[in-house]
Amino acid sequence: MTHFLDIHKTDPADLRHMIDHAGAMKTARQGRPKGAPDDEQPLAGHMVALIFEKPSTRTRVSFDVGVRQMGGQTMVLSGSDMQLGHGENIADTARVLSRYVDLIMIRTFDEDVLLELAEYASVPVINGLTDRTHPCQIMADILTFEEHRGPIKGKKVVWTGDGNNVCASFLHAAGQFGFDLTFTGPSQLDPEEVFMNEARAKGSKIIIERDAFKAVEGADLVVADTWVSMHDAQSAKERRHNMLRPYQVNEELMSHAKPDALFMHCLPAHREEEATSAVMDGPNSVIFDEAENRLHAQKAVMRWCLGV
Ligand code: CP
Ligand code: NVA
């Protein structure tokens, strides 16, 4: 079964194929209305379940539109409305859904839910974000970087703030695509050591630099994300904000990176917190290209999973 669970669990050649395929599919659609079908209809006759146990705008809409462009059908399911949210175990849910649908995308809290679903499903499962990782986002981000600046191999990415789920997938990508990553944030919010070491073992330079200004020196890409993720307790908000304020991405910080350094944010953003509007709407920001590229990257991921 070809699941897309995480970037470090996916063969680098397959990752490269998906990025290139996504770019080609994007080019082929240029100028068409969003709802127009692709020339190829590889998902014709396929049913895709999109399960959300957390809120979503981009993941929900981009998967739904992507499936439809490729000729398939979707059903969007909220975890709390399913028996899953009322005690039916994951293994049984996986086996039942596999009798109805050809592909499952799930956004959930605990990674174990994703892994158990994948273990018991007889159809491919895609990770649409867990507390621990967000691989589809980073596939879109790699596509976006390469559209603007060419191959990401050998480049320097700087992650600012919280070493969270999106940061984890960036670290996985560093190892698989061969770029370096500097993390700048408070020690309490460092990324998981195991993810940093895995990327190092694959030859990437992974550095922790507490001084944000030093961290961004020579950066080709500066990345920010929310300071309080969906899985974080709201009660921790003030403490986290106090710790993270020195890591805000503003024009002064960006002026210490390379002059052509791109700025990325997976969105949703809290403007004037983790990044200022001047940066988010500035000339080096590619945040809305990232959002668009979720669509193209995930179409390639779905085709790879289904082998179509
Ligand atoms: N970036 C991202 O995954 O956004 P949503 O939470 O809106 O899906
Ligand atoms: N780190 C954020 C990403 C949202 C797309 C969260 O998990 O809430």
Image: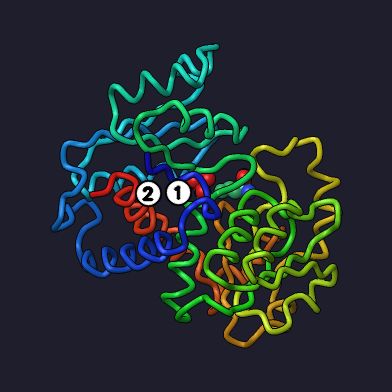
Answer with left or right where residue 78 lies relative to residue 17: right
Horizontal side of 202 relative to 76 (left or right) equals right
> Which residue is at 16% across, 36% downward?
45
Q: Is residue 33 above or below residue 118?
A: below
Q: Residue 286 placed where, x, y %?
A: 50, 70
Which residue is farthest bottom? 259
Disc 2 to disc 1, C-alpha distance: 6 Å
Residue designated by label 2: 62
The answer to which of 215 and 200 lies nearer the viewer is: 200
* Quarter the N terminus occupies: top left
Residue with the mark numbered 1: 58
Disc 2 and disc 1 in contact, CB within 8 angstroms: yes
Q: Cβ of disc 1 within 8 Å of ligand 1?
A: yes
In the image, what residue occupies the spot 66% across and 52% down? 226
Any atom of ligand 1 within 8 Å of the CB at mark 2?
A: yes
Give, as a three-letter code, the residue at label 1.
Arg
**What is the three-letter code of the residue carrying label 2?**
Ser
Q: Quadrant of residue 297?
A: bottom left
Q: Position of residue 39 (x, y in %)?
A: 13, 58
